[in-house]
Amino acid sequence: MQPELAQVDDVELLKAVARKDEQALADLYDRYRAVLFGLINRILNNREEAEDVLQDVFIQVWGRAADFDEKRGRPFTWLVTLARSRAIDRLRNLASRERTAIAGAREPTEAVSDAVSDAFLSEQRGLVNSALAQLPEEQKHALTLAYFDGLTQSEIAARLGAPLGTVKTRMRSGLMKLRELLGGKSESFGFE
């Protein structure tokens, strides 16, 4: 196939994906999975993680195909950019989790529970849960995925099928509302 024809084909496939044509997505996946997987795997150096990221990329393609603008570039370039971004996001996330695990392993463990400390933590948990319950569902869901599941904003956007900017706005609005609901105590909860 000539490059110009492949370009037109790819544009048409993305337009069909934007119309929620599953076969078009399958065709696009078949056409580019190997090259995108190779790129992602080179970045992550982990086959299982690369497979997950490749799936995330095509979930994002499914949700954002309408965002592709053929005047700004080629479909292949757009796909490579998405794959590279998702792989780097995952790499950062993995590094963050590893740093957290190492830091946690270094901290001394307290063998005996302190009843006052436990009561305080229980009260804090109750206040946070009460404040979270007052947030709109989309803000609460985004914050829960970030703070309790440890997802990055990009991962949250992919999971929710929402644009990254929307996720950032929801999280910012939710954090502002939590600060308001928790009064001056929000810093002690980690919502600064």
Image (spheres, rainbow, N blue to C red):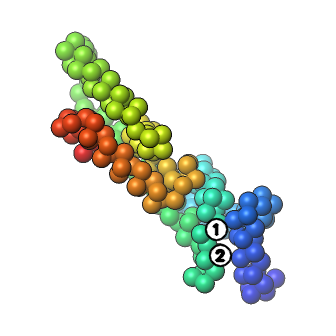
Q: Earlier in the sequence, mark 1 or mark 2?
A: 1
Closer-to-camera residue (96/159): 159
Q: Is residue 148 left or right of residue 14?
A: left
- The percent coordinates of residue 109 (x first, y second) are 26, 24
Q: Disc 1 marks which amino acid? A: Ala
Q: Nearer the viewer, residue 140 or 34?
A: 140
Residue 38 appears in the picture as rendered: no
Distance from the alpha carbon under mark 1 to that under mark 2: 12 Å
Q: Residue type at mark 2: give it.
A: Pro
* Quadrant occupied by the N terminus: bottom right
Return the x and y of residue 97 as percentages of the image width and height: 40, 44
Residue at 73% across / 64% down in the picture? 19
Q: Secondary structure at mark 1?
A: helix
Whether residue 22 can be seen here: yes
Disc sitting over residue 75 in the figure: 2
Q: Which residue is mark 1?
A: 66
Lateral position of residue 159 relative to residue 101, left or right? right
Residue 192's quadrant in the figure?
top left
Residue 131: x, y in percent? 34, 32
Asked if 27 appears above or below 159 in the picture, the reply is below
Q: Is residue 185 above or below residue 119?
A: below
What residue lies at 40% left-to-right and 55% top-to-bottom?
169
Name the residue located 58 percent from the left edge and 59 percent from the top edge.
Answer: 41
